[in-house]
Amino acid sequence: MRVELLTVGDELLLGDTINGNAAWMGRRLAERGVEVTRSVVVGDEPDVIVAAVEEALGRADAVLTTGGLGPTYDDVTRDALAKAAGVALVRDPALEARLRERVAKAGRDLQPMALRMADVPEGAALLRNSAGSAPGLRVELGGGVVYALPGVPSEMRTIMDEVVLPELAAGAGPLAVARRTVRTAGLWESVIAARLAEVEAMPGIRLAYLPDPAEVKVRITAAGGAAQERLAEAEGRVRALLGDAVYGTGDESLASVVHRLLGERGATVAVAESLTGGLIGAELTSVPGSSDTFAGGAVTYATSMKHRMLGVDAGLLDEHGAVHPEVARQMAEGVRDRLGAGYGLAVTGVAGPDPQDGRPVGTVYVGLAGPGSERLVTAPRLPVPGTGMEIRAVIRRMTVVHALELLRRVLAGVAPEDVARDAREDREERG
């Protein structure tokens, strides 16, 4: 079963809307063993849509379209599919009645334009949309099939899960492809790829590297017979070669792993943030149930606040400024003690776009104060990509990841001296 995706909308071409539908559909289809061979974006022009559908059906068994099924005049996917099939658009009485009923229940007046959603290509099958008004369509064309879905994400996902995915999975036959995503932090993509050269050479195994700032997801794909067994073997080698850099799999986030490890220890963490301005706290509180292990945080952006709120030595700040390893250590101790947490995590640095106190953009210190006398400060070497506000966004995001990764490793039992050694080796490998 070979499938192509066709997303429709001028807003996608112009960059006003991110094409999240295609990304979601690609993941879900892959999970069901359906091979997606191409993804295309076109504008709201019937002739362009017709041409794209016909070309796709020349290569694939099925085409999935999203967008263009709404009530406005720029929703033209229905018209295009009718033209491609050489049939007329016809009003479906049952669908019209359902639309009128929905509008009446909502206490609104029916706009004549809304009835466009009851017009379907003659002979097309309706795909019930339990999450909205516009139904999906199944149209048989040229030996293949087109599934037309609404562009509203919640409606598209509902029809996909309830109708389209089961049908396509049945046509795909037994799952002959197995996939697993391994999540890592603290290593660059090129470093990971170099370490995994032997896995790349394993028969029937394909690796894909999906980088984000300071994180890289490694997707492992095994195809052919005994795919699950070979996937397990490849994953084992990936974990062995990357070691402590692996923190989870699938959709598991770094913050969720940190909370789990804190919970296992019966511990809590408090954060003190300078350059990140509360982003670490936001990341930690994005996890449901985080109040059990996250005590709170302090955003001490101004240098004076580091002394007044956290007790950082005023003489140290006067002599060295806010960006200094000892400042990071004292911030971590201060927030831990003031909030009564088991661990204090702190960051200070220069996010840019300009240097600060003679220190270049990308200079960052991460401090961690644990129970008792446990102390650690690391200085991740952050690159300076792009210009202006782009630099700030990337540096701040990378700092969040490095801070959480430092805490994760310590909670996972990696000795502080090994954490510091790994950080040095990573900087050297990056050059």
Image (spheres, rainbow, N blue to C red):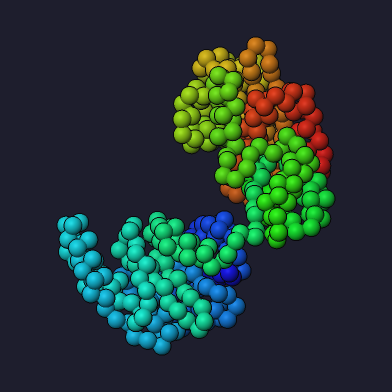
Q: Quadrant of residue 148?
A: bottom left
| In the image: residue 193, left or right of residue 101 | right
Expressed as whole percent of the image width and height from the top left, the position of residue 29 reads: 54, 60
- Residue at x 24%, y 66% (from the top left corner): 99
Farthest-out residue, bottom: 86
- Give the vertical position of 102 relative to 390 (above or below): below
Residue 7 in view (yes/no): no
Residue 75 placement, left or right of 239: left
Left or right: 328 as drawn, with respect to 63: right
Taking the spot 39% from the left edge, 71% from the top edge, the residue there is 137
Q: Answer left or right for 141 relative to 303.
A: left
* Badge count: 0
Identified at 17% across, 64% down, the residue is 109
Q: Which quarter of the rendered picture does the N terminus lie within?
A: bottom right
Please state the horizontal and vertical placement of residue 283, each as a whole percent of the image. 53, 36
Q: Toward the viewer: 243 or 314?
A: 243
* Residue sitting at x 68%, y 29%: 409
Q: Compared with residue 199, is residue 311 higher up or lower down, i.e. above or below?
A: above
Up-down relation of residue 233 to residue 124 (above or below): above
> In the image shown, does 406 or 309 lie closer to the viewer?
406
On screen, residue 99 above or below 381: below
For the C terminus, the image quarter is top right
Q: Position of residue 106 (x, y in %)?
A: 20, 56
Residue 109, can we see it?
A: yes
